Amino acid sequence: MTADTKTPFDHVNDVVAQLKEMRHYAKNNVETLTAQWLLFDGELRKLKHVEPIETLMSRQSELHDAFNDEIAALEDLAVTLRPPPEEA
């Protein structure tokens, strides 16, 4: 199926799949950053670099929440776009 022959339903499903993949990598990045943060929190405090890292972690969390919200909205949209079942 080419881009020209895809239905809106197909396009929405493609976007949902891509967003889910992006969410997965974002989650892994947050987990990695959190692990590093826990290891070096004391040192970062001494170097006065706590605030920038906390800001990045908050932004990453907001991005993850936005992925979840958009995925849910597009999945709801996909339900309305789903073609009716073909009769046998």
Image: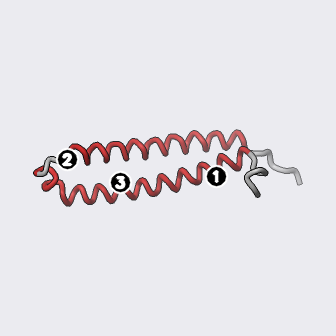
Front-most of 2 and 85?
Answer: 2
Residue in the picture at 77% in, 50% down: 4
Decide: few, some or many residues near mark 1? Use Cα within 10 Å; few <14, some 14-19, many ≥20: few
Label 1: which secondary element: helix
Decide: few, some or many residues near mark 2? Use Cα within 10 Å; few <14, some 14-19, many ≥20: some
Residue in the picture at 21% in, 43% down: 51
Separation of marks 3 and 1 at Cα, in angstroms = 24 Å
Percent position of residue 42, x then y? 13, 54
Residue in the picture at 55% in, 42% down: 72
Figure quadrant of the C terminus = bottom right
Residue 14, numbered circle: 1
Q: Is residue 12 left or right of residue 26?
A: right
**Circle 1: residue type:** Asp
Residue 30, numbered circle: 3
Percent position of residue 40, x then y? 18, 58
Residue 80, numbered circle: none
Q: Is residue 80 left or right of residue 33?
A: right
Separation of marks 3 and 2 at Cα, in angstroms = 16 Å
Figure quadrant of the N terminus = bottom right
**Circle 3: residue type:** Val
Label 2: which residue? 50
Percent position of residue 3, x then y? 73, 52
